[in-house]
Amino acid sequence: MSRNPSRARPVSRQVLADHVHEAILESLMDGRLEPGAPISIDGTARDLDVSPTPVREALARLEHTGLVVRVALKGYRVAPVFSREDFAHLMDARLVIEPVLTRWTAQRMFPELLAELRKAITDLKTAPRGPSFAEFRDYFEADERFHRLIAENSGNPFMHDAYTALGGQVQRFRLFGGVGITDAEFAIAEHQAVFHALEQGDPAAAAAAMTDHVSKVRQRSIQDAPPG
Amino acid sequence: MSRNPSRARPVSRQVLADHVHEAILESLMDGRLEPGAPISIDGTARDLDVSPTPVREALARLEHTGLVVRVALKGYRVAPVFSREDFAHLMDARLVIEPVLTRWTAQRMFPELLAELRKAITDLKTAPRGPSFAEFRDYFEADERFHRLIAENSGNPFMHDAYTALGGQVQRFRLFGGVGITDAEFAIAEHQAVFHALEQGDPAAAAAAMTDHVSKVRQRSIQDAPPG
DNA sequence: CATTTTTGAATCCTATGGGATTTGCCTATG
DNA sequence: CATAGGCAAATCCCATAGGATTCAAAAATG
């Protein structure tokens, strides 16, 4: 018995399809793959130096998230850009789901979570926000992390699923919607309001602060967003 | 020009993976595959007389729905049965999402939708409800269809996605949660209340009726459900 | 020149094969 | 009897190959 007896296996071994899935998701999330861009199965297989089989499996998983779209016999593409109407719908959905998640999470706060949220807020404030769009990566990442932490800790796995169905789209809009760059100062203050309510363990205030934040994001973005 | 010029192709051709996906989903939804049962890739490939490749793709899609679970190198299984706590969480999530969908749909009612909803209600009332569990298939199907029609017509695709993330689980619970058989009379009346509010085009009443329905389903089921 | 046809490359889709891993069973051992 | 070890079948995982389809650009036609 040369192996660790308490945990015979690291945790759960990964197969190639898992790595491919992560690689594509990363390219999607940090903006390397732009909306509408084709994702060739054989091509990414060559790029990643694997066979097409695990690539097909990874893309099939992603299809269900709405981040990529598939047309039979034609292949996969990154989901197209949002129209202004799509954006409004996305924000309406967030307004239903995120305040509830925030309320529930506020009822279950624990020190480690508070620390992680605090770090996300700090990262949000200190992230460099250069003039170029690519320099917002860290800022967007911290923003996404803050919302995700809240969604993950509501205690309700089904509502978490409902959030993740939206979360990817939100992140994609951050990258390609053209917003989030100009309103950082406002957004940071709104995030802090949510954080403070969570810190106090006040569910009603936390939910209200989240509602306020999302609805203001909606307002600002619909004004600023390019026509579409 | 021998082909129809307005629609060169039927609609969108299907590939084998699509058929496999449908076949597995059907087995899942009508109860042929019980919770926890293994779904062998090579085995279903033999059953359906295809190669394992499209089966892998179909299962990868299903994995993200939560209806099947996958362990690397061990394979896929039908998701395990719900605990009583899981059920409560699922109903809490429905209570957030379904009333909103109902309100929005009530604002967009049109004759065809009303007719389809009316048919679902009729089917619900006339479906045979024998003593055995298998004889509830049609009843469950009509129930699922009623809720799905509302979710599909809210006008917000993102909220629809959030619902479908739950919908499959709800249907699975109908089949294996041991409820829904004893409370049919109550449930039919509650569905009718939702339908009447929709018929009147009264969003607030429709949302309230849906809230009433789901919360009562929750109450009844938690009482009746077997311990777990 | 505009439109259609053809041609070839790229890509999708799926069957096949085989190495790696798991699982069940059978045997051996204490 | 309980446990450990080993073997065989089943299964997962992935690379490969080739037929089917799409796409784009060249060639042909009017």
Image (cartoon, coloured by chain):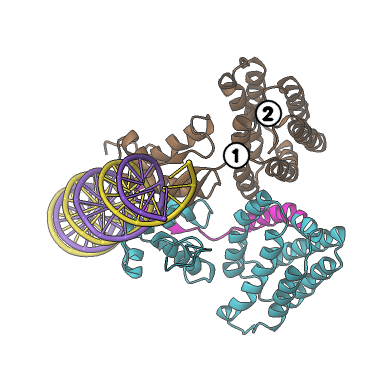
Chain colours: A cyan, B brown, C purple, D yellow
The span from disc 1 to disc 2 (Cα, nearest Å) is 13 Å
Q: Is residue B162 above or below residue B28?
A: below
| Residue type highlighted by circle 1 | Val
Q: Secondary structure at mark 2?
A: loop
Magenta run includes residue A78: yes
Q: Quadrant of the C terminus of chain A?
A: bottom right
Picture quadrant where residue A223 is located: bottom right
Chain containing the residue with disc 1: B
Q: Secondary structure at mark 1?
A: loop
| Residue type highlighted by circle 2 | Val
Magenta run includes residue B163: no
Comparing A81 with A5, the one in front is A5
Relative to B36, B83 lies left or right:
right
Q: The magenta stretch spans which residues?
A: A72-100
Other residues around mark 2 within 10 Å, as few (<14) / some (14–19) / many (≥20): some
Residue B145 position, x and y percent, is 61, 30
Mark 2, residue position? B179
In the image, which disc is placed on residue B81?
A: 1
